[in-house]
Amino acid sequence: MVFHKFSKNTIAMLSKTIAGGGPHVLPQAQYNNMKKLKFVIISLFSILLVVPTTSFAIGQITSPIIISDALRGRSYDEELTIINTEKATTTINLSAEGAIKDWTTFFEPNNLDIATSSIFVPAAKTIKMIARFNIPESASLGEHIGMVSVGQSAASKPDATESSASLTQKIDRQVLIKINTQEKISYNVSIIPENYDIALNQNLKIRIIYDNLGNSDIKPDIHLQIKNGDNIKYNILLPYPDNELAVKPNSQHEIRFLEIPLTGFDKGKYEASFDFYDNDKLTQQKDFYFNIREEAEIKTLMGSLIDTAKKQGPLLLVGVGIVILGVFMSRLMIIRRKKYQRILKFHDIISK
Amino acid sequence: MKNKKLYIFTMIALVLSSFSPLLVSAQTTGTTTNINTALTRDSSGGTNPIVKAKWEMNNATSTAGKYLGTDAQTAANAQFMPSGQYQVGKTIAVCAVVTDPDGVADINEVYGDLYYPEDTSTGPNHASDRLGCGQQLPEFTLNSLSKTDGIDLFCNNIKNNNNNLPTFNSGYDYAEICNLDGELWKETAKVYCGEITLSYEDPSGSYNTLVLAQDKSGKDGRLNNSFTYLPVTAFETDFDSVTYGSVRLNTHKIISGNLTFNPSDEKATVRNIGNTRLDMRVNQNDMGLGKTDNIWNVKFDGRVGSDAAFVNYYPESTKTLPKTLNLSETNEMDFSILITKFPPSNDSLNYVGTMVLSAAPATHLTCGFPQV
């Protein structure tokens, strides 16, 4: 395809060159033209070698979605992870089949209000989507089997001058929903204090993240005690905040952090113990220890980390300085030695 | 002279006799000499190092080159996604908080060991030539992070953003390790990290990992847990359409694929680029050929691999093709078409349609049985 841009004469010259006649036999202009042709051919070969050939691919996480003990009239969200292994942005279509087909809608994780059935996925990226299974009140008890699929259609259309079929690729993920009538409360909770060392009269800040593993929404209440040995210093019942959404099944939710005032607490080691209640039933227990210290003590202890960095800074500067000084001194010595040699030489000439 | 000869003879005899125990204990097999060697491990003195906590994470770093402490899912311990791309591995970091009652200077090395899932075979096509079945991946060394980086990674990034990632040794938790009296602050414990790459085709499942800290007396401390290599089903084809070309009435036309993954050769090839085995399914529309007496005017066949039997299917029905694609297997796809009637309502010379190729995960090959 490229060759038509060059004259027949040039191609003939090229053939001659390849056959054994060197470029030295060509006139300068034709030789330059030849060089251009060679450059184009080499470039084309390089491009063919470097640019990967087109292929067509798709992938998704396929661990089966199993919702045990689903309740009628509830919805359950599950995460889908989709991989675009193409080298260009592609449109991924989402679909459901089987007994769960009409129960399933798809959402982007940051927009759980507007359902969608397709999503753009950038080249070589992984994205997450949410599949929501709405269990109708009329659903029968027992197992319901289906699958959720991600698919993409070929960007290029087949040649219309021949009988052919264009390709769509799909990856299927099995779904099993067991419908039951009993509520199951099961969840994990992570308690993350901002610090384990609190300055005197400062507040203890605690993050709480719920991970709902059961089949119904949860709103646990917290009974918090802060103890110094057997001495209970703080005792409070914290109902689930009214302004927080309930934690839905198969989802994580972090409530607004707790801030416990420690005014009047003495220095020392304390235990914060948490009892979690769901409908007055104890469901989880957690605890951790923390220290109350003088602010100056914390600064001193924390300072050891900052000091290390601070110490390393000047040390590095000193090191660099020594190297520069060393180089400078050696250069100076070389210059002085050369100068001395020149003086000696001059003296030799004079004495001769 | 005679005395001199006697002296030389005596010396040679002495030299030979000094080697005699070796000669006696040596066992010669052909031209190879096997020499028995033995040593006794001296682990006297000192106390065992302690691995207080360990975890696995993505090797992703901030712009400053610091580990972020992330993994793929929110569940406890680590979950990782394979790349889903041909020959693109997944590098993970294995880290641990290690201390030694005799001082961190007594810690000689910290090692990471990973093991394939038990009872899962990688199968006959695994390019890395590994068996799976609980086999150990190459052992690697963990290197210590600076005090600042170690505290920032464990007590900041992981504690605050990925709290359920680590496994703690008995008696240890975030509070013990991260409080200002803790050993990371006092530098009597350090965070060690090392990296290893899993292949894109290493099987999904639970990988046991062990961190082993060894001190200078040869005493060691260990902590193990496991992470999940999430199952990603993915396939790649070197074709995006199937050209049936000229088809004669009632003449079975086969479109053969080949084993060469080359988009420009116009021969259908498929390869497994995920970390599960997979079954291919096919569904094709009628291409406008319609029905007569409620029977389709067209019928198709398909198969994966030339040694598999063709499976025939009518339009709009999904059929699973019998040959399961093993991990990293590349194979040909053959299709065929049989038209029993060209409908008079469609006088077009060419018929165009759509084919859906789908894949569903299949169970891994198990160990101890002949591999398919």
Image (cartoon, grey):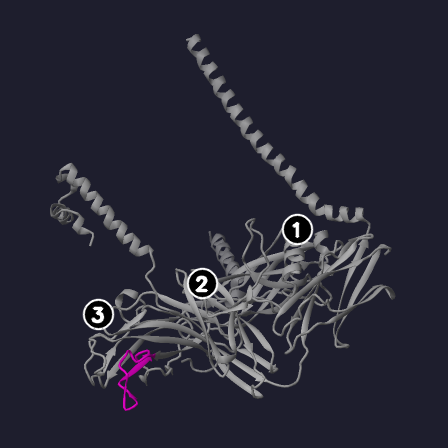
Mark 1 sits on what residue? B147
Q: Pick whichever of labels 2 and 3 is earlier in the sequence.
A: 2
Q: What residue type is labelled 3?
A: Thr
Residue density around tag 2, few if under 14, some if 14–19, many if 20 or more, within 10 Å: many
| Marker disc for residue A290 | none
Q: Is residue A130 magenta?
A: no
Residue B78 screen position, x and y as percent: 58, 66
Where's the C terminus of chain A, which quadrant? top left
What's the CA distance linking mark 2 and mark 3? 32 Å
Observer-nearest of B22 and A10 = A10
Q: Do badges 3 and 1 share one subunit?
A: no
Image marks 3 and 1: residues in contact by CB distance under 8 Å:
no
Write down the region rendered in magenta: B284-306
Query: Which of the two marks, 2 or 3, is nearer to us in this view?
Result: 3
Image marks 2 and 1: residues in contact by CB distance under 8 Å:
no
Residue B174 screen position, x and y as percent: 71, 61
- Residue at mark 1: chain: B
Q: Can residue B242 be seen in this view?
A: yes
Observer-nearest of B279 and A126 = A126
Mark 2 sits on what residue? A121
Taking B59 as reference, is A81 above or below it?
Answer: below
Query: Which of the two marks, 3 or 1, is nearer to us in this view?
Result: 3
Query: Which of the two marks, 2 or 1, is nearer to us in this view?
Result: 2
Image marks 2 and 3: residues in contact by CB distance under 8 Å:
no
Where's the N terminus of chain A, which quadrant? bottom left
Mark 3 sits on what residue? A161
- Residue at mark 3: chain: A
Taking the image as shown, residue B214 lies to the left or right of residue A277, namely left
Q: Which amino acid does label 1 sit on?
A: Lys
Residue density around tag 1, few if under 14, some if 14–19, many if 20 or more, within 10 Å: some
| Residue at image coords 70%, 72% | A219
What's the CA distance linking mark 2 and mark 1? 40 Å
